[in-house]
Amino acid sequence: MEYNKETDKKWQEFWLRERTFNTDTNDSKNKYYCLVMFPYPSAALHVGHARNYVIGDAVSRYKRMKGLNVLSPMGFDAFGLPAENAAIKGGIHPKTSTLNNIATMKNQLNTWGIGYDWEREVISCLPEYYKWTQWIFTRLFERGLAYKKKAAVNWCPSCMTVLANEQVISGACERCDSKVIEKDLEQWFFKITAYAPRLLEDIELLTKWPERVKIMQTNWIGKSTGVNIDFKVEGEEKMLTCYTTRVDTVFGVTYMVLAPEHPMISELIKDNPEAPKIYKFIEKVRTQDKNDRAAVQVEKEGVFTGRYVTNPVNGKKVPLWIANYVLMEYGTGAVMAVPAHDQRDFEFAKKYGLAIEVVIDNPTQHLEVFQMTAAYIEAGIMVNSAQFNGLGNREAIENIADWMEKEKTGKRSVHFRLRDWLISRQRYWGAPIPVIHCNTCGCVAVPEKDLPVMLPENVAFKPTGQSPLLDCAEFLHTTCPKCGGKARRETDTMDTFVDSSWYFLRYVSPKESNQAFDKNVVNKWLPVDQYIGGVEHAILHLLYSRFITKVLYDLKYIDFQEPFAALFTQGMIVKNGAKMSKSKGNTVAPDYIIDNYGADVMRLYILFMGPPEKDAEWQDEGLLGAWRFLQRALRLVDMLKDYREVKEEGGLNNYEKDLVRKIHFSIKEVTQDLEGDFQFNTAISRIMELVNQAYKSINEGTVRKEIFQQAVDTIFLLLSPFTPHISEEVNSALGFKESILKRNWPCFSEEYIKTETVEIAVSVNGKVRDKLTIHVNWSKEEIEKKALTLEKVQHFLAGKPPKKVIYIEKRMINIVV
RNA sequence: GCCGCGGUGGCGGAAUUGGCAGACGCGCAUGGCUUAGGACCAUGUCCCUUUGGGAUGGGAGUUCAACUCUCCCCCGCGGCACCA
């Protein structure tokens, strides 16, 4: 039997014709929603991309054969910067290039034999989709969860737009790697911080998510518990609130520090003759790029405000400073400084000659301030802390917090590292934010009947730092939906992560023109049963999607709180030790492989190369191995066709027994591998062993045709999620009329796997010395007796009786001498 | 610095969860077939000083038995990071 490009084509057309992958969502019985993260449309896919879809397809095909009603849709995350940047360079409109790329990509996915329900295709840059992205925005806006504010934001000077916190990687833009600077700008935010506690708590519900993703989200949300303390500013009624997790050190405060961005600074220094100097310092810090400012090794710098504050626990007056090491975004932007027990404060105090006071003593060696070269941050005994002296500092944290709450000098408080999600972008290729600015009514959401706010196509979209839509008069000028007066449209567009934070809801009813999704169907089909994608989305996309899902839940549009029941994150394919990328020139193009070997060879190798959740090194020779294996398996089909009927009377002979056992054992193992954590690599190696056994039995003994046929049939049934074209071909050659997907996944019986005899290892002092074939009914004593007579064992016994004998059933016997 | 993941032949990787380390595949070697190459078939393939000894990053420990458990250390990858 031959396998070639025509085979691929034949079956791809067959699936299309038979509507094999089109799912009726009205029937949700035995539903299984298998979702692969929708891609950004790119023209040049490499095998690294292919891995994603091949894994998803293997899962979807396997589940179909298990009798589940599988929904497997695909779409495109089609807004975004690359198309816009390419357009600026090459002059092709982003819409044109994006739609072209989509066509190319769909075609590629088809040639790989990936089965999707293309009637449910979702393209985020088309008005019928982004209408509902805008609608979701207006839902959030109405609840006060979308708001505009002037804030210090991350600005990428190369992309000429703002970035969400999540898009800043070590102080650089995640897309272009330029250093991000801070700017004060009026921007739109989603109030994801309001959901921080739930986003954190509900991680517990995600039992089928990888641990590492959950940890990353936990860290990103970054909960910390501590105490807010009000320090009174001397000579004013004003209070300055600081946040600390180390309330045990509160008696050791010797100064207080504000972030340079702190809003009260101007007021506090207005009478200070040194004010210009202070402003100069603040300016200097703020124009520093974020990465540099955040680096630990950066010298701590600060300036005295001329003001003093009072520590409420002991009435001590301490100086108030401004310093580069305090962040406005975290806590309250004000920090109580305890140089004796915080390394940053210690360095700062040393540099500016500020007091240092020990309040936690080292139990093993008494601390003297003048001898200290670093802050003492270990556990210790409270000193100089009034009634708390003598306590361990760990328990003092709770005691002091209780006391301060009672005295009303402080209040327990929880802080999150998570920031609100900055969703506005000053770029063209995105969904317009559906808001109208009216001089009398203020910010007004565009009413649902006026959605979508269409993105005009005829726009000069050079990045200038301002939104390109500002230059489009017919877009900009409008009337206020409330008062009908002259008004102006919002010209910023939305972060593409807004588009992708709800697309999984759209697939179940993609053609809906009156609502974002059909509530009934969504509630039946979601949460997604299996979500598959790259680990690079561990924080951004997955956190945003969880957030939007919770918002929609609260607004009663859906009745589930988490969008993805199970998550699988596959590893990258690397070549020469590096991630595949065009710029590195180490990509491997699937087209070449498809042309020369066929889709199934590529699919098989990709799945065989290693555990799917781990990175894997691409080796061209590996393809050859997959090719050889499939040829070898196909030759069995030819052999079966010309097989002479064997006259065999009575029960099975040993060759037949071995083959039958291997058939059942393989089904068992492959099923287990697929039911577990998608261990395709070991599943495939099991099938290889079955093929090897088939050859062995046929070559060395006589095997009845029906048993041989059962072996061949099983091989291709088990292979079919991985190599669907070949499997369909064989399935049809064996006389089956319907798609192999309509057949049941094979069953096994333990009865056939059992053996009467088994070979066990015989070890002496834990070291294997010999083998022994035993009958499964033998008692431990019998086996022991046999083992002790073995020559190799005798050698080690040297005439003495064994000290101890341990028998592990059907595995080994260990003799201790 | 903190958190997480990982380290097994020449290579990708297995190991029933404490029970025969190296399944399966690549590569390599020898032979067969072939005008030749490829493909295919067969056999072999951890190392050594071989009645034996040594090997799962290094070192210790628990155990009859450790890739697997415990402790210390080294290396690689990923996330977070002046978070008070």
Image (cartoon, rainbow, N blue to C red):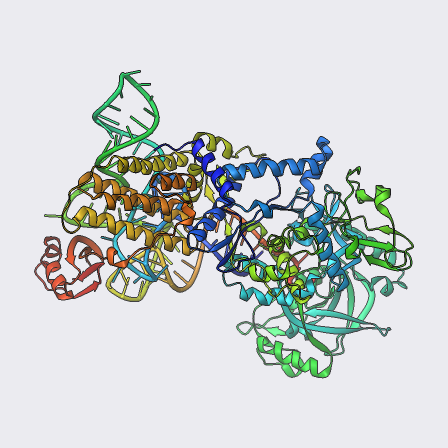
Report x, y in % for residue A261: 78, 59
Report x, y in % for residue A775: 15, 59
Q: Which quadrant of the figure has residue A552? A: bottom right
Residue situated in front as seen by the camera: A95 or A798: A95
Compared across the picture, whether A185 is left or right of A343 comes to right
Q: Residue furthest front?
A: A737
- Tell me which residue sits at (43%, 51%) in the image: A62
Compared across the picture, whether A528 is left or right of A658 comes to right
Looking at the image, is A703 positioned above or below residue A293?
Answer: above
Residue situated in front as seen by the camera: A255 or A804: A804
Quadrant where the image shows the C terminus of chain A: bottom left
Compared across the picture, whether A776 is left or right of A313 comes to left
Residue situated in front as seen by the camera: A403 or A382: A403
Q: Residue furthest left?
A: A799
Residue A506 can be seen, yes or no: yes
Residue situated in front as seen by the camera: A157 or A493: A493
Q: Which quadrant of the figure has residue A98? A: top right
Looking at the image, is B16 positioned above or below residue A15?
Answer: below
Looking at the image, is A609 positioned above or below residue A215?
Answer: above
- Tell me which residue sits at (57%, 47%) in the image: A74
Residue A215 can be seen, yes or no: no
Quadrant where the image shows the N terminus of chain A: top left
Report x, y in % for residue A759: 19, 54
Q: How many marks?
A: 0
Compared across the picture, whether A576 is left or right of B43 comes to right
Report x, y in % for residue B24: 32, 43
